[in-house]
Amino acid sequence: MRYFVYYYLYDERIKDVPGGPMKVFDLCSNLKALGHDVVLFAPDIGGPREQTTARVVLIPAFGVPLLGIIWHEAAVMFASLLELARGGCGAVYARITTSFAPLAVARLAGARLLTEVNDDPFLRYAAGAGKLKTRIVRFCDGINLRRSDRVLAVNAFIKKALEDRLGVDPGRVRVVPSGANTALFRPYGKEEACRELSLDPSLRYICFVGSLNPWNDYALIVSAAAGLCAERPDLRCVLAGDLDARVERLIASSGMRDKFVLTGRVAPAAAVKYIACSEVCLSAISPDSEPMTPVKIFDYLSCARPVVAAGPRGEERLLEGCGAAVLTPAGDAAAFAAAVRNFLADPSLALRAGAGGRKYVMDHYDRVSIARNIAALAEEAA
């Protein structure tokens, strides 16, 4: 089958940065490896051609707010029509977007439209309640999702929200977790990783790998990590990713600045090494956010490291039976720190749990298997 794949518009945050929408790049490569013809339409940022084996059609970026959107719609439609003239299309796969291009292309080609809802869209609706732009975005999302042949939600909470609050037909919604690239996120020796990263291998590390998304609860992470480092002089907390001035102030006010390793933005291959240095990996969603399942949880587990994750209820079903992920209530720094402390107190437990987590992801959430499932859903929607 021939797939056309689309993801979000121009985003300055990922300009010239390896990574970006890795889940989309992995899907394209895996579908191609399964024998499908895949064309990825991508903004000309973030080096997409270096991150997927699929054919990439670059859409020149025009980073001006309103004009950029109009330009992108026109350029994507023109490029898509050229590709349709060269060979047609059987399925269109799009990450949720206000663009109508994927829907239009699917209808023109008589193709199945699969739309991925990677994060809870209601977060952005709530953030701009009452604003015209927010209403337009919600209107566009509703049209795209209700007309999709399959809507792929990353967890059951988002599935139910789409059905109840946007009126998406329940028969069209499937839960398809983000999963992990188990070939990239893999076990790696601590000694080797510390040497390559110039970290002291005699110290112990915990880590958070992520970006400045508004739902990350940095206050909880910093508070819990500072308390644990005060208890254990040999413990350090690695924060790998962008940090803003607010987070820097949180760290400074903790009085434990020297216990934090701040890396700035890192490429995925380097993230693997920081995870390898660590005994426990961290994830925290703020209490006022909707339940979501951060991709980092799967990446940590795939690297054979146990995870402590704070967040609203909603992730339990995806991780049921894992044994390597301890979920604590959102906003409860004491419970979060206690769960990390349990792993630190018993390194052999952490190692066993990590190995089990790696197997769990390989068995259930490997992105090659997820690509097979998506291909089956595309056939099912025919």
Image (cartoon, grey):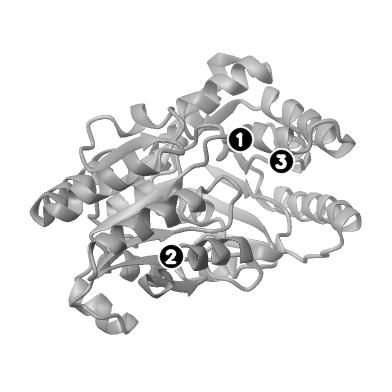
Mark 2 in CB contact with mark 3 (< 8 angstroms): no
User: In the figure, is residue 379 to the left or right of 10?
Assistant: left
Residue 186, visible in the rendered structure: no
Q: Secondary structure at mark 2?
A: strand
Identify which amino acid the numbered label 3 is placed on: Pro
Give the image location of residue 105, x and y in percent: 74, 40
Q: Which residue is mark 1?
A: 115
User: In the figure, is residue 84 to the left or right of 185?
Assistant: right
Give the image location of residue 112, x and y in percent: 61, 31
Say which quarter of the image contains residue 44.
Answer: bottom right
User: In the figure, is residue 212 to the left or right of 285?
Assistant: right
Q: Which residue is mark 2?
A: 239
Mark toward the start of the polypeptide (3 vs 1): 3
Q: Which residue is mark 3?
A: 102
Say which quarter of the image contains residue 329.
Answer: top left
Structural distance between the alpha carbons of marks 3 and 1: 9 Å
Mark toward the start of the polypeptide (2 vs 3): 3
Mark 3 in CB contact with mark 1 (< 8 angstroms): yes
Q: Which of the two discs, 2 and 3, sits closer to the camera? A: 2
Q: Secondary structure at mark 1?
A: strand
Identify which amino acid the numbered label 1 is placed on: Thr
- In this rendering, the count of numbered labels is 3
